Amino acid sequence: MSSQDYHYLTEIRSHYREWLKAGAPVPPWKPPMIWVECNACSGDKIAFMNTQNPNLGDVLYRYIDVRFDNALVAAEGHHALDELLETVARHEGKFYLFVEGAIPLRDEGLCAVVAESNGQRITAQELITSIGYKAGYVIAAGTCASFGGPSAAYPNPSGSVGVRDVLQRPVINVSGCPNNPDWLMGTLFHLLFYGEPEVDQDGRPLLFYQYTVHRHCQRRSYFDRDEFADELGEIECMFQLGCVGPRTPSDCPYRQWNGYVNWPVRANTPCIGCTTVEFPDGSMPFFVPLPEKHRPGQPVPMPPEESAPSGVHRDEQGTPQVDEGLPN
């Protein structure tokens, strides 16, 4: 960490401590929060718990009441499920539903079983569609929950889709693989104090996704002068090495990661566009120039001797359906 980064981080922490001492605003009540992990890697949960300003302890103590979560509550088994169902019944229209991971549709959703009741498996698809309409807000945490993400990458054998594809209601998509802790916390706090944030055409809060990585990239001047790196590690623009910053909405260049000290391009690796709707298929192969990547909606080419399984399509009503021909 450079002395400049250390000073910046220290200043942020100082402002936060002063904010707390001055009597940090507290919402009129602590809304119940339900966090359901579906077809996911837990990366967005880890990001949520890595929040620094405010820290996780303050969030849990002051601002939200976590009722269901596989990491933050002590209850297990049917006790945890009972708490979830009671929360939905008692706080319908008020609780916050955070969904992490994509929703598998294949085989009646059995690729993601999130609970059991009386010997019956409860799939992510079943749970989210049954409680999603009763939530005050639905927040898709991460790109898998937002748009399908890596869980829905070609050939998508589980038939996974984003939350917005199974719920016909507004969903706030806090995309990223994983997302930045500030994106989740910023969205949460906006909901607490100001209501639903303004979003773009894909449901992402403009607070964090209004501009592309390219707009504020520290290497933008090299791009403008047509000076491009030939190999990783060189200081010029990495557009020719696969960077998709020009079409990736995110404030990574100035918010940064790991305690506000670094981000991919500064660490000499191209942006792979993890906040985009088409990630990861639309960013593949990672290290070829953007014009040569596989465009959204086009499958990654497979060797001729292999058959390419179909993915997911929408029927006439717009409902996602798994194509016939998927391997059993």
Image (cartoon, helix red, strand yellow):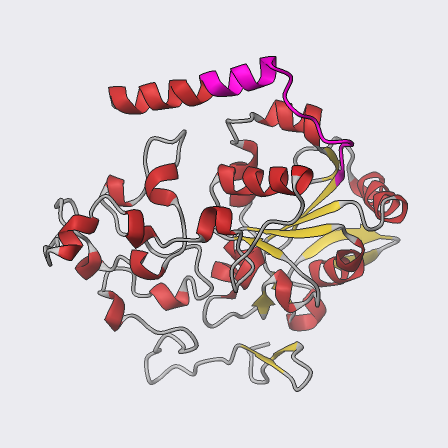
Name the residue located 13 percent from the left edge and 49 percent from the top edge. 236
Q: Is residue 210 above or below residue 15?
A: below
Residue 293: image location, x then y, percent? 29, 70
Where 322 sits versus 268, above or below? below
Furthest toward the top, the residue is 21
Figure quadrant of the C terminus: bottom right
Give whichever of 205, 252 is nearer the camera. 205
Q: Residue at x 33, y 73 (%)?
A: 294
Quadrant assignment, res 86: top right
Residue 297: x percent and y percent? 43, 77
Q: From where the camera sits, is residue 178 visible?
A: no
Image quadrant assignment for residue 80: top right
x, y (%) of residue 155? 47, 72
Q: Is residue 84 magenta?
A: no
Q: Is residue 300 left or right of residue 233?
A: right
Is residue 131 visible in this depiction of the protein? yes
Depth check: 290 or 159 in front? Answer: 290
The magenta region covers 14-32
Tell me which residue sits at (26%, 19%) in the image: 3
Q: Is residue 262 above or below residue 247?
A: above
Decide if residue 96 is on the left or right side of residue 243. right
Question: Is 27 in the magenta?
Answer: yes
